[in-house]
Amino acid sequence: MRKGLLTISLVLLLSLAIVLPSCTGEGETTGTLNVQATLDGLAWPSSGTGAVSYTLTGPGTAPTGTTSVPKSFTVDAGAWTCAYVSGGPGEFVDITTAATQTLAADGTITFTLNFQSAQVDVSVTFVTWSINGTPVPPNPFGPGTFWWVNEDTVVDAHYAVQVGGNNTGKPITLHETKTITAHNVGIEGEMPGAPIVWHVLNGLGAVSTNPPFDISNQVATVEGQPAARCTNILLPFCQDVHLDVECDVETEVGATFTKKVNWVRNPAGVNITALALLDDSVFEISAIQAFTVFTLVTTACEAVGGEGFVDTDQANDCSGASPTIFIGVVPKGFPPTPLPPG
């Protein structure tokens, strides 16, 4: 009888050992796989998630959602390989601690995608003044001569921009600042006259590129302060007035393009009644005495926007000052200075 009881007890004990879960984790078959990223040795992004595509290859079904970091996955134990596909900040460098790692059951492995800021060299130079899109010298007939303009005339400036670097085609945002210094030199450039009055138009077509790129966040400023549309600007005799237009341009590494800024429009000569309200210039003349002359000098600067890029030569980020152009306004009906052949 005792022998039978002992046999039954051993069978029960063995059954319990099979049914009860292990306290040592021996029954686990999955673990945690983390993917994160760095930019120039610092965690990226600093908050939230960043867009970067990668693949994870290992035992079982590959996880989905491999398009952002940081991210954690629950996957089968075994050897896993992480491979970079696209996206992220700057230039992809490598994956640490290794691109292939072994995940133990109930364990954790981490793949770190490392990036460094891409090196670019952005430069800008002044190219030419233009009137109604036709390139012109600063003085039509040499020093001391003026470009006489009448109604419906726009004075423009052209700049050449180049984005060099070894990541051709990679999208990049440039923050651009173009400035003019306007100076009222009086009637026929000699005698004091009434102040010139401009106003801010900040037209959507005032800044353009060739080839065309997306332009956003365009702001006009007066003496360094953002100015709303229709803000009046006084140009007293013999005083400098500093104006600019700032915007962002979505372009790419390797791009070379021309930027045109339609700086000021004379909408209806000196006999202004209703403003033209055309959206193709930064500023517009509101009032000016007949035969009054003003001068313009322009500069331009480019700055690399966003993260993941470093400008290797900031000495060429700004153009030098342009030649001074002389603009005089004649009464309505007077002929303007003929423009050069197109």
Image (cartoon, rainbow, N blue to C red):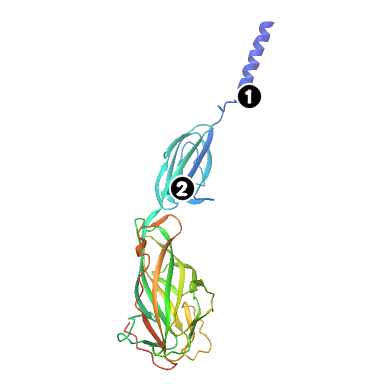
Point 46% across, 69% down: residue: 246
State the image coordinates of residue 94 (x, y, percent, origin top left).
Answer: 40, 44
- Quadrant where the C terminus sits is bottom left
Q: Secondary structure at mark 2?
A: strand
In the image, is residue 265 above or below residue 12?
Answer: below
Mark on residue 20? 1
Q: Residue furthest left?
A: 142
In the image, is residue 28 above or below residue 317?
Answer: above
Q: Is residue 118 left or right of residue 7?
A: left
Q: Nearer the viewer, residue 25 or 190?
A: 190
Q: Is residue 74 left or right of residue 41?
A: right
Point 64% across, 17% down: residue: 13
Q: Nearer the viewer, mark 1 or mark 2?
A: 2
Q: Please tell me in which quadrant of the rendered image residue 143 appears.
A: bottom left
Q: Residues within 10 Å of mark 2 (few under 14, many from 20)?
A: few
Q: Residue type at mark 2: give it.
A: Leu
Q: Please tell me in which quadrant of the rendered image residue 28 appears.
A: top right
Q: Residues within 10 Å of mark 1 (few under 14, many from 20)?
A: few
- Quadrant where the N terminus sits is top right
Q: Nearer the viewer, residue 241 or 146?
A: 241
Point 64% across, 15% down: residue: 11
Between the residue at mark 1 and the residue at mark 2, the CA separation in whole angstroms equals 46 Å
Point 35% across, 71% down: residue: 320
Which tag, 1 or 2, sits closer to the chain's start?
Answer: 1
Badge 1 vs badge 2, beta-carbon distance below 8 Å: no
From the image, tell me which residue sits under label 2.
42
Q: Nearer the viewer, residue 161 or 194?
A: 194
